[in-house]
Amino acid sequence: MDKQTHIIKTAQKLFSQFGLKKVTTDDIAREARISKTTLYKFYRNKEDVFQDVVELETNQMIARITESVDAQDSVESKLKAFLNAKISSIHNLINFYRVTHDSWNEHWPFISEIHDRFLNEEKRILLAILTEGNRSGELAIDNAVLHAHILAISLKSIEFPWAVPDNHVSISTIVNLIIDTFLNGVRKRV
């Protein structure tokens, strides 16, 4: 592992344990077992390190979602894989969610840019699924771009702990219900 990657991985662990505000460049250098001079060869300050940590976490989540979706063959299974990968990745992305939430105001432009990029990646993946569903005849969507946008925005709610009921409903039950509602709706069939 090169030095910069080592710094990012070390900082990721520290930020997730103590938060952005409490971690210093001294802490990162000490934990990484490098001098501060070495740290400053790569980064101006801890905020720059944090940006790379959040970027790493974002890329990891996108890769996991893409890999999960690509392993499936039907629209329904791809959508379920998308949601399952997203939900299971969220708890590993402490810095992307918790720390960015804690520091949102201080780092608004960067945090906003990362969240926007992630949302756009989600929409791109969902659009590919919906477009393939139209092509295969599994779906009949007039405006796949708009549907991908609405689905991505709707699915953002699962990123928040309060959105998932705490009454022992399994994640797979929630995923199945969300996808079933999207694909079949809730209107009574005649």
Image: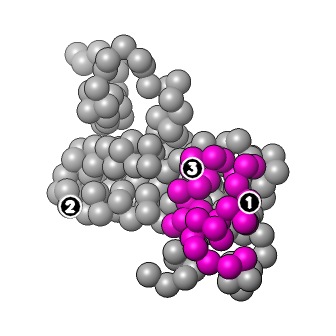
Residue closer to the observer: 146 or 142 = 146
Q: Earlier in the sequence, mark 2 or mark 1?
A: 1
Residue at the (36%, 44%) spot, across then down: 88
Residue 108 appears at what percent x and percent y? 78, 53
First-in-chain label (3 vs 2): 3
Residue 40 on the magenta segment: no
Q: Considering depth in this image, is 144 or 115 the residue closer to the camera?
A: 115
The quarter of the rendered structure image containing the N terminus is: bottom left
Magenta residues (range): 8-36
Give the spatial CA distance, label 1 vs label 3: 13 Å
Q: Which residue is mark 3?
A: 16
Task: Measuring from the top left, give residue 142's x and y in whole percent.
Answer: 41, 49
Callout 3: helix, strand or loop?
Answer: helix
Amino acid type, mark 2 = Ala
Which residue corresponds to mark 2?
A: 71
> Three-letter amino acid code at disc 1?
Thr
Mark 2 burial class by Cα count in 10 Å: few <14, some 14-19, many 20+: few
Q: CA distance from mark 2 to mark 1?
A: 41 Å
Q: Secondary structure at mark 1?
A: loop
Question: Residue lying farthest left?
Answer: 73
What residue do we see at 47% from left, 35% from top?
158
Query: Residue 4's spot in the image, x, y percent?
Result: 57, 80
**Do callouts 3 and 2 mark residues in contact (Cβ within 8 Å)?**
no
Helix, strand or loop at label 2? It is loop
